[in-house]
Image (spheres, rainbow, N blue to C red):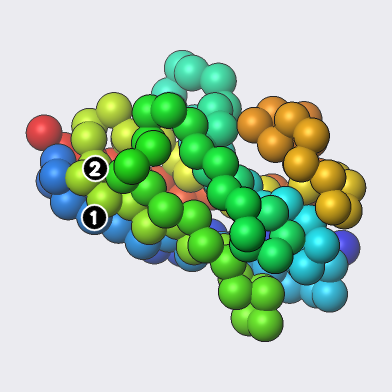
Amino acid sequence: QVQLVESGGGLVQAGGSLRLSCAASGRTFSGYVMGWFRQAPGKEREFVAAITWGGSSTYYADSVKGRFTISRDNAKNTVVLQMNSLKPEDTAVYYCARARRTYDTTRYYSPDEYEYWGQGTQVTVSS
């Protein structure tokens, strides 16, 4: 079993920054794509960013490209989402997730391709 625990959410003014962390337990961290998704009230869960198993490739939603950065430390079993220039429309619950299959980047943007999820952390950006 894999457990993912997010931290770092909070309330910030527009233009500010937050750093989200995801700590994974268990041995099954390396070899998998890790992703961040978010869900705002009344909306579907949407892709934010993903990173391949070695960290050599990263993917971003157009809405966050240039403002958010995803990174990972396999030695520490952690994934980080650095969020800069935050906007009110970034307000949502943010979730960390681990892919279903090893060494597979197919449909990294789809929640269906992820097997394990954290409990989420709230990010609120005030205008």
Residue 111 rendering spot, x and y as whole percentages? 70, 32
Q: Is residue 22 left or right of residue 31?
A: left
Q: Is residue 89 something that shows in the picture?
A: yes
Which amino acid does the dot numbered 1 rest on? Ser
Image point 56% across, 41% down: which residue?
A: 59
- Mark 1: give few (<14), some (14-19) or many (20+) Cα within 10 Å: some
Q: Which comes sooner in the sequence, label 2 or label 1?
A: 1
Tag 2 and tag 1, C-beta contact below 8 Å? yes
Q: What residue did someone put label 2 on?
A: 86
Residue at disc 1, secondary structure: loop
Location of the C terminus (image quadrant): top left
- Mark 2: give few (<14), some (14-19) or many (20+) Cα within 10 Å: many
Residue 105 rendering spot, x and y as whole percentages? 76, 41
Q: What residue did someone put label 1 on?
A: 17
Location of the N terminus (image quadrant): bottom right
Residue nearest the observer in this picture, 26 or 104: 104
Q: Is residue 28 left or right of residue 48?
A: right
